[in-house]
Image: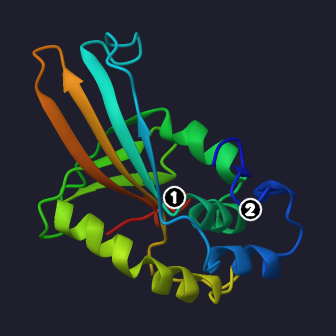
Amino acid sequence: VSEGKNESAGLGVSELCSQERLCSLMRWAEAQPKVEIRYDEEPSSELLPGVSPVRAVILYPASFAALRERFCEGGDRAFIHSLQQAAPWYSGRGGKSGSTFLKTMDDRYLLKQVPRSEFWSFHEHAPTYFNFVSNTPTTLPSVLVKILGAVLVEYRNSDGVKSTHYLLIQENLFFGNNVSR
């Protein structure tokens, strides 16, 4: 899925006109459960000096694209733009998981690094998640954090050491809100 296109369904997600159709696409039983992208071993990029991408695995790309089109202002294009700039985020009062978090510079999204087992457990239960979220109204407030993407990223640093990160991308519930204690 790139630029808002769902190649497997032959549809541009951003071109779907009804919320009902988006919900249907989220629950699409034939949706590809994952897409793996392998990169040629190339020197590091200007964007990430000293880092060479090896592979990325994107879970349920069509279902997540439909979910983002329904719940994210600007759809996939704005979502990808936000993800291009993220920095470590230390909330000072985070949960007990000890997970590493990144926050996009526009404060819209959080990237949570999770253990391998949690990532693949999400993969296993994702169809149930999409079914639940597709039945959630967009207008009612909710404290359920929506997971908007799940990506495995593998890269090699300048010393040749390979690292793998399992990331769940979620909305920042506090975006646009003035939160005080």
Q: Which of labels 1 and 2 is toward the front?
A: 2
Q: In 3D space, how far apart are the residues under numbered discs 1 and 2 (Cα atoms)?
A: 32 Å
- The quadrant in which the C terminus is found is bottom left
Instruction: State the image coordinates of residue 11 (x, y, percent, origin top left).
Output: 81, 57
Amino acid carrying mark 1 in the image:
Phe
Residue sitting at x 30%, y 20%: 52
Q: Point out the tag, 1 or 2, that comes first from the N-terminus.
A: 2
Residue 54 in sight = yes
Instruction: State the image coordinates of residue 4 (x, y, percent, origin top left).
Output: 72, 48
Residue 84 falls left or right of residue 89: right
Residue 5 falls left or right of residue 60: right
Instruction: State the image coordinates of residue 21 (x, y, percent, origin top left).
Output: 80, 77
Residue 92 falls left or right of residue 38: left
Of the pair 32 and 43, the residue shown nearer to us? 32
Residue sitting at x 80%, y 82%: 20
Residue 93 in sight = no
Instruction: State the image coordinates of residue 145 (x, y, percent, origin top left).
Output: 44, 73
- In the rendered view, tell whether residue 37 sits above or below residue 41: below
How has the structure been colored for display? rainbow
In the rendered image, which residue does mark 1 sit on?
175
In the rendered image, which residue does mark 2 sit on?
9
Amino acid carrying mark 2 in the image:
Ala
Mark sitting on residue 163: none
- In the rendered view, tell whether residue 135 sits above or below residue 111: below
Of the pair 109 and 56, the residue shown nearer to us? 56
